Image (tube, rainbow, N blue to C red):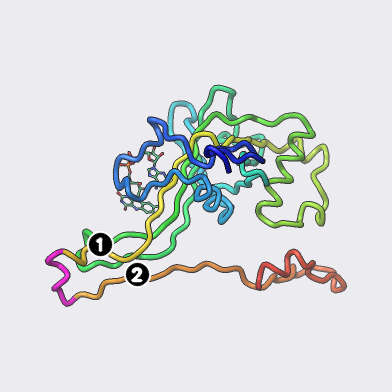
Amino acid sequence: LSYGIDIVTGVSESLVETERTRHRRLREQGSLDREALIGILRAGFVCHLGVIIDGHPMVIPTVYGLSPDARTVYVHGSVASRSLGARPDTEICVTVTHVDGLVMARSVFEHGVNYRSAMLYGTPRLLAATGDKLLGLEHLSEHIAKGQWAYARQPNKKELAKTSLLALELEEASVKIRSGGPSDGDSPDAELPVWAGVIPLHTSWGAPEPADDLKPDIDVPPHLASFGR
Ligand SMILES: Cc1cc2nc3c(=O)[nH]c(=O)nc-3n(C[C@H](O)[C@H](O)[C@H](O)COP(=O)(O)OP(=O)(O)OC[C@H]3O[C@@H](n4cnc5c(N)ncnc54)[C@H](O)[C@@H]3O)c2cc1C
């Protein structure tokens, strides 16, 4: 890294704060670390996609993928999906949230959640050319289950025509992270006979379970077997 710019990818190591992404409340939980943003995006695959449809806000849970160079986020779905029918001038907001624990304080007011969250803003590109679409879908698929793009049958022309794919560059984004215990330890409430601390939340994959109709001679491929370990 040199002058805050990664000389290989050309991506700035810090997020540039904009009027929109400037944290107002609980600013100490905000971060301008691009690596933190990338870590949050790599750790998940479900986002909430916020759009304005016919003048009304709509927030849709959907999967996303991050490109290997960590510059672009992809969301996809049916061409009939209204949330994906973005026009070139339509901005979206994408959020990704990981909950790490419940923060139990002595007072109800001070209870909280440990989390890592990211918000992305921008005008996405609707990918229409077959090559762009296939590459974007590969990035999305590989983000969720590495190795599956090459393993499974890839989309044919008909399936591609039924699929909308939006690409959003990671240009305007914010990160917020809360960790640690309750913050009422130095208040008079610390004297109360009330348990305080953190209840961590861990999520993990189980071992792959075969489909009921799976041909008996097909084993779990290594890239999927590794999920449950
Ligand atoms: C799982 C979870 C639970 C939460 N529960 C609560 C709750 O119960 N009450 C509460 O007040 N807050 C809660 N928060 C924090 C909440 O997300 C907001 O950060 C906070 O409420 C400040 O909101 P605001 O409208 O004042 O944002 P502002 O500070 O005005 O937001 C300014 C900008 O900061 C950025 N920003 C704000 N919040 C986030 C975020 N979470 N992640 C990334 N960027 C962000 C955005 O770019 C936004 O445009 C929770 C967060 C998470 C992830």
Dot 2 corresponds to which residue? 198
Q: Earlier in the sequence, mark 1 or mark 2?
A: 1
Q: What amino acid does circle 1 point to? A: Ser
Q: Give the residue drawn at x 21%, y 59%.
A: 109
Element marked by disc 2? strand
Counting from the top left corner in percent of width and height, residue 92 is at 51, 33
Residue at 28% x, 64% y: name it. Answer: 182
Q: Is residue 57 left or right of residue 103?
A: right
Residue 36 image position (x, y, % from top left): 50, 50
Q: Which residue is mark 1?
A: 183
Residue 158 position, x and y percent, is 80, 38
x, y percent for residue 118: 47, 46
Q: Amino acid at mark 2?
A: Val
**Closer to the camera, 212 or 130?**
130
Q: Is residue 146 visible?
A: yes
Q: Residue 190 in magenta?
A: yes
How busy is the neighbourhood of tag 1: few (under 14 within 10 Å), some, or many (20 plus)?
some
Residue 193, placed above or below residue 132? below
Q: In the displayed image of the protein, which residue is found farthest to the bottom?
A: 193
Above or below: residue 18 compared with residue 115: above
Say which quadrant the C terminus sits in: bottom right
**Region rendered in magenta:** 187-193
